[in-house]
Image (cartoon, rainbow, N blue to C red):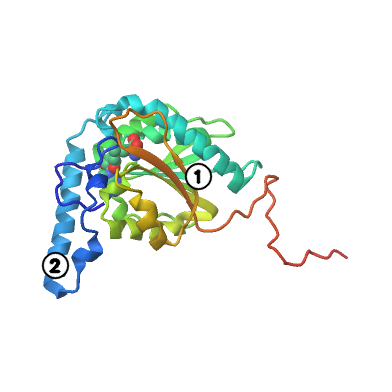
Amino acid sequence: MWVEELGSISTATTSAAVEAEAAPTAAAAGNGGAGEEATHEKKRKGWYSKAIAYWQGVEASTEGVLGGYGCVNDADVKGSDAFLRPLLAERFGTAKRHLVALDCGSGIGRVTKNFLLRHFNEVDLVEPVSHFLEAARENLTGCMDQGEDSHKAANFYCVPLQDFTPEEGRYDVIWIQWCIGQLPDDDFISFFNRAKVGLKPDGFFVLKENIARNGDYISSFIFPITHLTLQMKQDQMELPKELFAVKMYALVTSQPKIQNSGKRRRPKNSPRMIRS
Ligand SMILES: C[S@@+](CC[C@H](N)C(=O)[O-])C[C@H]1O[C@@H](n2cnc3c(N)ncnc32)[C@H](O)[C@@H]1O
């Protein structure tokens, strides 16, 4: 979310950005003509460069990307796992399928290494801070399972989300964890709208994010504008009390078309095939 003060960049643990939720960018754009727009764009650039400068000064470690709360890693992974499993079964059925995920704002590849690679055959990482992405590359080379049912980190993109458009139809899941607060609201919404093209027909987004104490701003104000359907929402449990609450959201572009058997569901009222 957009905040005036960048002393406190949104981290996994101390999301002053989420808490502050100051003026959304559309309001800042206003209707004051080119001058105002130029000021607004300057402010946006400043916002992004301060954020990147902040992360460039952070150690490429679990403690670093989790703002000194590396201890939440295990609970985080457990919570994500419990959230994702039923969704995968519901959306894709139990038939074997080559699954591909995108890890957004991947940092050092913590989420990919500890969680996504267990479920997906290929994971791509997108992260704007090069020393994090290099650490991810190193951290992930040792965990490539190269058997017949291989699981590997495939592509590493050093790009911020506001400039990233995924390859069309590549992903079953686009996982966005503890990084969307780095984007002003309008770029957050544009990212979701652009990234839809990256999903396979039954694919979905998962957003895992800190929630402001004064309400679920993301569900109330952001999701409706993305025209995505909120399929499932769950709280992350077992976090230290002093941290923000964290929620997981699954967002879909369509209702599931796959049954447990892996067969496509026949749309209601559509005629059965007549075999001669
Ligand atoms: C709190 S860390 C979380 C990292 C990782 N998702 C995890 O959970 O371990 C936030 C991450 O967002 C990245 N980030 C900062 N600005 C970004 C942007 N504009 N687009 C994408 N990622 C960004 C940071 O470099 C950092 O890796």
Place residue 102 in its image quadrant: top left
Q: Amino acid at mark 1?
A: Val
Quick check: 227 above or below 243? below
Residue in the image at 65% along x and 41% along y: 94
Q: Earlier in the sequence, mark 1 or mark 2?
A: 2
Q: Seen in the image, is 81 located left or right of residue 244?
A: right
Q: Amino acid at mark 2?
A: Ala
Whole-Å distance between the Cαs marked 1 and 2?
A: 39 Å
- Secondary structure under tag 2 reads helix
Q: Residue furthest right?
A: 276
Neighbourhood count class around disc 2 (C-alpha, 10 Å): few under 14, some 14–19, many 20 upward: few
Residue 15 numbered tag: none
Residue beneath disc 2? 38
Residue beneath disc 1? 100
Residue in the image at 21% along x and 58% along y: 23
Residue in the image at 42% along x and 35% along y: 236
Percent of width and height locating residue 274:
83, 65
